[in-house]
Amino acid sequence: MECPSWLLEEICTNFSNLTVLKFKELCNRASHLVLCGHDKPILSDTSEGINSVNNHTNLVLIGNWLLLKPAGYDCPSTDLEKEVVQLGLPPEHGIQLRKVYENYKSELREKVCSSVYREPHATIIDASPSSITFQADTQMYDVSMSGSMMNQLKNDVENALSKMKDFAETLPMTN
């Protein structure tokens, strides 16, 4: 996925100017923020200004764009490191990001998988060549359309299901 220009600017201006230790601490805190929903307390005061509002924004950016999104695509950690360095992050920062990503990758990936919205299961109640009635949860829906539109809908749904099945077969098996 192409890096948004605003993120590229943040990497070049903000993250590159941080010390390696401060960047590592922000990466660890960002992973905690993404996984637990809150920032973890700072145990040491090794970096000045680490609790500033600007650093909270950095936590969100690192967590969502540099940790969570790559985990969602199952990006190898070495590829992530190379990409962020190519985008302008210093190599030492890239190494720290890779280490944090490796430590939390499976948890981040699980977070992405569990956050995918799933529509409630729908049950077809009645169908005819020009209408369909179905129920999802307690809600009833009646959809009427011309016969050709109904055939097109049926073909589109069958095609989508076939592609999802093909895609599901390419995914690694999880326990």
Image (tube, rainbow, N blue to C red):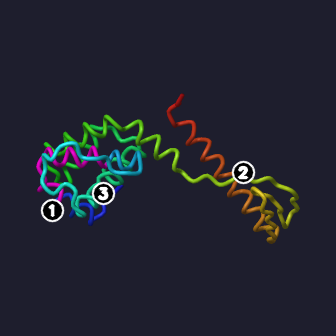
On screen, residue 106 versus residue 117, left or right, reads: left
Vertical comparison of 106 with 38: above or below = above
Q: Quadrant of the C terminus?
A: top right
The answer to which image quadrant residue 65 occupies is bottom left
Please, what is the dominant secondary structure of the magenta stretch?
helix
Secondary structure at badge 1 equals helix
Measuring 60% from the left and 47% from the top, which residue is drawn there? Answer: 163
Q: Position of residue 33 (x, y in %)?
A: 36, 50
Magenta stretch: includes residue 85: no
Relative placement, left or right, of 148 versus 61 is right
Q: Sequence order check: which comes first, mark 2 or mark 3?
A: 3
Farthest residue, direction top: 175
- Span highlighted in magenta in the image: 14-30
Q: Secondary structure at mark 2?
A: loop
Q: Picture coordinates of residue 168 (x, y %)?
A: 57, 40
Q: In percent of the image, x 69 and y 55: which residue is there?
A: 157
User: Judging from the image, what secondary structure is the residue with disc 3 in?
Assistant: helix
Q: Which residue is mark 1?
A: 13
The residue identified by callout 2 is: 121
Quadrant where the N terminus sits is bottom left
Which numbered marker is on residue 61? 3
Q: Amino acid at mark 3?
A: Leu
* Residue 90 located left or right of residue 56: left
User: In the rendered structure, are the residues bearing label 2 and label 3 in contact, judged by CB atoms less than 8 Å apart?
Assistant: no
- Real-space Cα separation, disc 1 to disc 2, in angstroms: 47 Å
Q: Tag 2: residue type? A: His
